């Protein structure tokens, strides 16, 4: 399973092995070319510096349980 950032969907997408278009050798190791559900081709690499991380994930908007009413 892969979870690359899709610039078209503007989110991380969970993609399985059926979404692998090709595997190629890059300068820092292997890279997989994946096809997102929206048909965008995404190059995924295990090298952290090569794959865009996407926007920061917002903090949870759940109830603050650190302050309890007495």
Image (tube, rainbow, N blue to C red):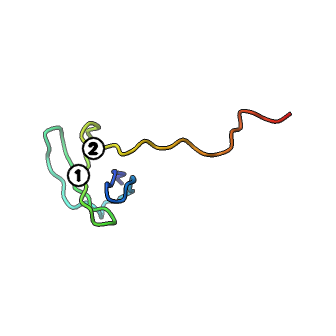
Mark 2 falls on what kind of element?
loop
Measured as percent of width and height from the top left, residue 24 is found at: 15, 51
Question: Residue at the spot x=25%, y=45% of the render?
Answer: 45
Image quarter hosting the C terminus: top right
Relative vertical location of residue 48 with respect to residue 40 in this rendering, above or below: above
Q: Which residue is drawn at 26% across and 62% down?
A: 40
Left or right of 28 on screen, residue 69: right
Residue in the image at 27% along x and 42% along y: 46
How dense is the environment of label 2, judged by Cα within 10 Å: few (below 14), some, or many (20 and up)?
A: some
Say which residue label 1 marks. 43
Q: Position of residue 35 (x, y in %)?
A: 27, 62
Q: Earlier in the sequence, mark 1 or mark 2?
A: 1
At which x and y percent is residue 32?
A: 22, 52
1 and 2 marks in contact (CB < 8 Å): yes
Q: In which quarter of the image is residue 23?
A: bottom left
Q: Name the residue under label 2.
A: 51
Establish if 21 lies above or below 67: below
Can you say which quadrant of the picture contains the N terminus?
bottom left
């Amino acid at each position: 399973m892969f979870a690359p950032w899709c610039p078209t969907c503007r989110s991380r997408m969970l993609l399985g092995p059926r979404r692998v278009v090709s595997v190629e050798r890059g300068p820092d190791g292997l890279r997989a070319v994946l096809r997102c559900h929206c048909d965008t081709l995404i190059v995924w690499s295990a090298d952290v510096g090569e794959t865009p991380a996407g926007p920061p994930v917002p903090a949870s908007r759940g109830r603050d349980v650190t302050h309890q009413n007495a």
